Image (cartoon, grey):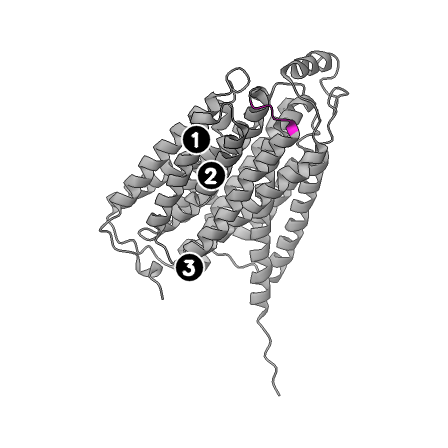
Amino acid sequence: MIIKRAPLWHSKQCVQRLSWHAFEVLKGCIFGLTGATLLDLSKIYLTSPRAMAYTITTRGIGSIIFCIFAGVILRYVNIQVVMIMSLLVASLCVALNPLLGQLTFCHIAMFFLGGTFGLIEVGSNGWIIGIWQEKSATVFQFFNFCFGLGGVVAPLVAEPFLSKVHSRHTVIETIVNGSIGNSLKILPSTADTTVYIPYLLLGSLIFVNTAFMIISYAFSRSNISPGNSTSSDSTCSRRSELIIVAAFSAYVFFIVSLEQTYVSMLAVYVVENERLDFSKSNSAYVSAVFWLFFTLSRVVSTFASLCMRPSSMLIVCHSICLLGATALIIAGKWSPIIVWISTGLMGAGVSPMFATSLSHVMQYILLSHTYMSLVMLCVSAGGMMSPILVGPYIEEEPFVFLYVNLTQAIIATFLMIFLVVFTRGIQIRPAMKKK
């Protein structure tokens, strides 16, 4: 009797897929942890929340620079090697984030952390397109569900380690008392926080994930990219293709900027707005609510993508998001209940936008590593906008947070409408037709 054994390739693919998705969960943890701990990090580094928020901009700059070269790097270097090296750097940067002593060193670490995000995102999206093709819409939804799952967990894990009291006077006192003679001191005595613990834990988990990627690479050194799976079978002209890519890139810039502005500055807004009377613990919980609805929306959209067109899903998403942003403008200045409800609406609305719009665009053009590099560059640029648009004003004029969110939601909606209208009449690519 001959017993058939599953090819080693399938086992290796399973490990590889688990590693990709595990990192997306951990990446969600990084973003969720950053927003929830921003106030405590500012105390550790003896600076204001506004200055601390600029580390998010630095992270975005790193992503942009590495995205520019990602297409070339992934053309000549095995995607698994890129993943392994990026994960090693990311684990180190995350673990050391609160322990570097000086804000300058923190900026350097965030720059390289952002660079790893840029390389991994370009590679992972190309990897999904290369393997799944016409089924990639559902896979993208699940992939981003993993990101949201990490965002839910991180604020809840961080909450017990946050300092208990925050006020503007505390921040000023921390800066004045701690800046004299303590410029290189790690965790100054004025910082009554143990927030470095979740960062060390998260860095360790990323390192463990790296070990699984190394095992996967040891079994098979194959390389996967969208170009390996099919040649370009776009059904539109070159000019139309470039217009779609440009519009899509602008669109993802605004939806990512909206998402990151909200989740990065939400905790600071609810604490700084004295009319809401939020504690730091409650600010962590309201951040978790955003990520909870973000994740639940991913679950719904994953199944919805099996029976709904991407354009229809986008209309629903933007309607929910505009409802949440408008409610915040009307009553989010003084009503804690509206903040909680609108936060859930914002999370549910913005969550499926990237994966759904990507699925819509992929129906008409093949997104090569070059195109994905441009798209991810705009994603990275959007992710760094919150400290620029809101950071300088969040302490003195917290309400700017509300107006920036609504403005970005409106602009993104107009770009979505343009994408949907422009692609009408264009035939779906043969590779994306249901088989």
**Residue at coordinates 72% horizontally, 33% vertically from top-left?**
161
Q: Main secondary structure of the magenta part?
A: loop
Mark 1 or 3: in front is 1
Q: Can you name the residue that lies furthest to the right here?
A: 189
Residue that badge 3 annotates: 135
Q: Is residue 120 magenta?
A: no
Q: Is residue 383 above or below residue 363?
A: above
**Residue at coordinates 30% horizontally, 40% vertically from top-left?**
417
Label count reads 3
Q: Is residue 223 above or below residue 317?
A: below
Q: Can you name the residue that lies furthest to the bottom here?
A: 1
Please state, as top left, top right, bottom left or bottom right, where the C terminus lies in the image: bottom left
Residue that badge 1 annotates: 327
Q: Earlier in the sequence, mark 3 or mark 2?
A: 3
- Which amino acid does the dot numbered 2 rest on? Leu
Near mark 2 (Cα within 10 A), the count class, few <14, some 14-19 or many ≥20, is: many
Q: Is residue 278 magenta?
A: yes
Residue that badge 2 annotates: 345
Please state, as top left, top right, bottom left or bottom right, where the N terminus lies in the image: bottom right
CA separation, marks 3 and 2?
A: 28 Å
Where does residue 258 sit, x and y in percent of width and height? 45, 33
Horizontally, residue 93 falls left or right of residue 313, namely right
Q: Start and end of the magenta stretch? A: 276-280
- Which amino acid does the dot numbered 1 rest on? Ala
Where does residue 378 sit, x and y in percent of width and height? 42, 36
Horizontally, residue 262 falls left or right of residue 421, namely right
